[in-house]
Amino acid sequence: MNRRWIAPLLAFIVILGSSPLFGQGTVLQKDILVKRDEIKQNVISFGGTITVEGDVKENVINFGGTIIVDGNVGELVLGLGSTIRMTGRAVVEGDVVCIGGLLTKEDGTSIKGDTIYFEMRDEEGAGRFFNKGLGGMFGLSLIPIFLIIKLISFFIWFMVAVILAAVLPSQITYASDQIKKGFWPIAGTGLISILFFSLLVFVTALLSLILIGIPLLIALVIIGFVIKVFGRVVLYYYLGWSLARAMGNKNATPILSVIIGCILVSVITLIPVVGALASLVLSIIGWGVVIRTKFGTRRNWFSRSV
């Protein structure tokens, strides 16, 4: 297999939610125990319990579960709808982020970065919000449905972005750097790529009428999906890193930058008309940076070697 497809395939595997052991000590499974004197790169769980007694070099991430830190974490502890318990032995070199869950810290806990905590105190209050929506403000019964769809979309993008930032941080960082160095060439490449890809989809859709185009159409859908996801996560990082830097945080980790960018983009896309235009621009730039950097794996393949 050509090496240039390794990163896209890894991204696709992660997005589908598989749970193998990744290279360099990254673990994605339900219940994870990092024993004392044991070292892992990243640990990620969906609905399980992560117990860190040893060392995690980079990130500890849990969606809807429990995190117990009784050891060392090199970068980020992130819980989405999770309970995070920091013992007196816990040392986190980076940030602790708890969104929609519960965070407790014992005396002696050391967090050298920022602590971001949005507590979900009242499930009844959240349910009441979704049931009544913003009817009192707008008087439209469809708004709660619209918000629910947007929230579901946000959480899906949030989980995918965080996982990719944990598994492919160097590729995402490199691709983001290229946006700063060559915005307009990337935008032009993205526009041409989307137009060409749309033409290919149209042709293969016509060929599907005689069966021969069905495998090609499926392949194009998968390729387009992977390009869109990776490109969007790169933009989350770029926007989040830029905003964090503007606010004085010059050492934001890739995951924290992606979180900030995801929230920023989600808020912007809620605005009528402006949101649609922003999504179009993000898609163009995302496609351009993926094509020009080969998923952040190497130097621009349009540049000539000297």
Image (spheres, rainbow, N blue to C red):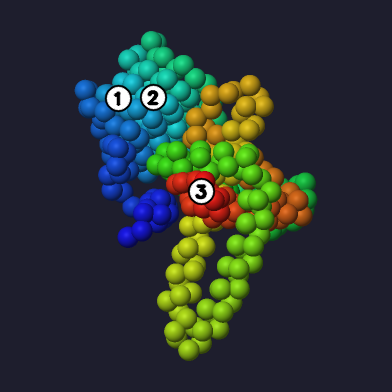
Q: Is residue 290 visible?
A: no
Circles 1 and 2 in contact, beta carbons < 8 Å: yes
**Distance Cα–Cα, label 1 vs label 2:** 8 Å
Please identify, in this view, whether the residue under mark 2 or under mark 3 is nearer the observer.
3
Q: Is residue 167 above or below residue 146?
A: above
Which circle's residue, 1 or 3, is located before the other in the chain? 1
Query: In the image, residue 261 lies at what x, y percent?
Result: 60, 39
The crowd level at tag 3 (other Cα within 10 Å; few <14, some 14-19, many 20+) is few
The residue wearing badge 1 is 55
The residue wearing badge 2 is 74
The structure residue drawn at horizontal position 40% and vertical position 50%, both measured from the top left corner, is 7
Q: Which mark is residue 114?
A: none
Q: Is residue 67 visible?
A: yes
- Front-lying residue, 48 or 1: 1
SS class, disc 1: strand
**Distance Cα–Cα, label 1 vs label 3:** 42 Å
The residue wearing badge 3 is 305
Q: Callout 2, which amino acid? A: Gly
